[in-house]
Amino acid sequence: MFYKHRQAYALPILSCGMALACVPDDGPQGRSSPMEPAVVLLSAHDYRFDAPDTIVVGYTSFRFVNESDQLHMAHLLMLDSGRTVHELLDAYGAGDPSARTVRPTFTDFVKRVPWARRFGGPAADAHATSAEVIQHLPAGRYAWICLRSTIDGVSHFSRGMTHPFVVRPTEDTAQPAMGHEAEVVIRLTDYAFAVSSPLTVGRTTIRVENIGPEPHELALLKLEPGKTMADFLSYLDDPQGPAPASRVAGVTALDPTLEAYLDVDLTRGDYVLACFISAPDGRSHIAHGMIRHIHVA
C-alpha cells in the first residue's frame, strides 16, 4: 500500500555537499543575479514552517532543512485566485479535532481541493537532512504543507503545518534565471520514467517534467553496496532492518505540464527512480510499475 510505503520508508538524504547560505533581508526573498536562480530557505519544525512570506517571480532554488525529530516534508501548492489557506485547512477539518483527516492520499486531495495545484517542492525525509529543488513560480498565492502524519495517524497538515506565501511580479526585467541548461531530462508518465540520456558520475542538472495526465513525483535513491532492486521492493512490503537505499534527491508531486530542476552529484553505483504517490484506483504508482533501476558508471 502506498501510505505504508510513504510513512515507513524514511530514507536519509545524501547532502551532496550542499551548503545553505543566508539571504539578505532586503525585502521579499528571491532577489538574485539575473543569471542564477534566487535562493529561498525553508525549514520544518513541529508543526510549522519557517519560510518567507513573499518572493519574486523567476527561477527559485528552494533549500529545505528538517529541524525536527519527526519526519516532515515540504509540498508546494498554488492556490486559485481568491482561495486561502484557511479554506485549505477547512477542507480537511483542521479546526475540528474530531474531523481531522487521517493522512490524506493525493487522490483524495485532488478530489477535495481541486483549486490547489500541486507544484512540487524539495523532497526530504529525515531529521537534520536537507534537500534542494529549483522551480519557476508564476505570480500568485501559494502554500507549503506537510502531508506526513503523527503516530496516531493525524496528518501534520491537518494540525496546521502550512505556510502561505505570495509570489509577486516585479518590474525588474532581469528576473532570476536557471543560468545553465539541464544535461539530462527525466519525463514522468503514467506509469514510467523516460530518461533522455544515461546518468554519469559527477555533477549533473536534471530537468524533471511531468508529461502524464496524473500528478507524479520523482525520488532518486542509491542502493547500498550489495543491495538489489529485489531487496528494495521487499523492504517496501516489509520495512524491517536497515533501509537498502538512501535518498539522494527528489521532487514532490508535480501536476501535469509542470517541471522542476535537480542539481545532483552522483557517484558510481546503482540507483532507483520511484514515484510513491497513489493512483486514482488507490494503488501506488510503484504498484503500477513506476519504478526503475539506473546504473551510474
Image (cartoon, rainbow, N blue to C red):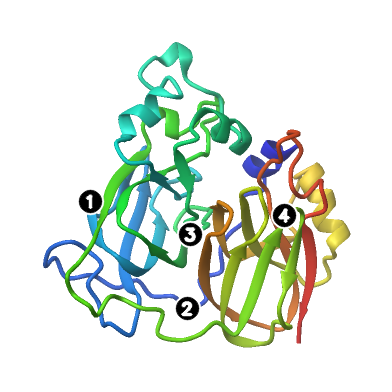
Measure the alpha-carbon separation of dots 1 and 2.
28 Å
The residue drawn where x is 70% and y is 43% is 5
The residue drawn where x is 71% and y is 79% is 196
Measure the alpha-carbon separation of dots 2 and 3.
16 Å
Going by the numbered disc 4, the residue's amino acid type is Pro
The circle drawn on residue 122 is 3
The circle drawn on residue 242 is 4
Q: Are marks 1 and 3 in contact (CB under 8 Å)?
A: no
Going by the numbered disc 2, the residue's amino acid type is Gly
The residue drawn where x is 24% and y is 80% is 174
N-term mark: 1 or 3? 1
N-term mark: 2 or 4? 2
Judge by depth and name the residue closer to the eye, 213 or 231.
213
x, y (%) of residue 38?
A: 31, 72
N-term mark: 1 or 4? 1
Label 4, residues with CA under 10 Å away: few <14, some 14-19, many ≥20: few
Q: Are marks 2 and 4 in contact (CB under 8 Å)?
A: no
Q: Residue furthest right?
A: 230
Label 2, residues with CA under 10 Å away: few <14, some 14-19, many ≥20: few
- Mark 1 — residue? 53
- Secondary element type, mark 2: loop
Residue 186: which quarter of the image? bottom right
